[in-house]
Image (tube, grey):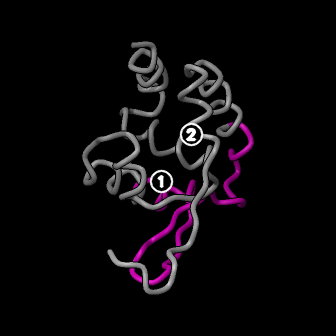
Amino acid sequence: MLICLVMIMLKPILGSESSERTLIYILARDEAYATEIARYFDTNLYGIQKQLVKFELGGVLVSWTSGRTRIYKFNPRYPFLEELTALLKKALEFYPEDEREDLLIYRHRPRRRGKPL
């Protein structure tokens, strides 16, 4: 239940839960794509996509395509990047320990050639 309280902690500043979820996930994983974020938080994909586009247009995030997937990460040239990441790191400290570990420990292996879907 604490995670619900934490998720709305930055909502007044960022404007929505999707904004917070998107930025926290990218902070924890360094880069991400919309479907990955939506699956992790079990939330609406459209809301996450909308936030990613908003942050990219605002210069907070940058993106590139890898195959058919658009990948996002923080824009190193964003003037308030240090302050924004400090705020997000502080919010992440209040997440429950298991949730924080799940976000921060990320293993993504490439798919083995010929492996059936």
Q: Looking at the image, which is closer to me, 77 or 18?
A: 18
Q: In the image, 29: left or right of 5?
A: right
Q: Secondary structure at mark 2?
A: helix
Tell me where residue 48 appears, x and y as whole percent. Answer: 35, 50
Q: Mark 2 highlights which residue?
A: 103
* The stretch drawn in magenta includes residue 68: yes
Residue 55 disc label: 1
Residue 83 rendering spot, x and y as whole percentages? 71, 37
Q: Amino acid at mark 2?
A: Leu
In the rendered view, tell whether residue 11 sits above or below residue 51. above
Identified at 65% across, 38% down, the residue is 84
Depth check, front residue: 10 or 95: 95
Q: Mark 2 and 1 residues: CB-CB less than 8 Å, in contact? A: no
Q: Residue at 41% across / 55% down in the picture?
A: 36
Range shown magenta: 54-83
Question: Residue lying farthest right?
Answer: 82
Does the magenta-highlighted stretch encompass residue 96?
no
Q: Nearer the viewer, residue 20 or 35?
A: 35
> Could you say where residue 114 lies in the image, as x and y percent from the top left?
43, 86
Q: Residues within 10 Å of mark 2 (few under 14, many from 20)?
A: some
Q: Which quadrant is home to the N terminus? A: top left
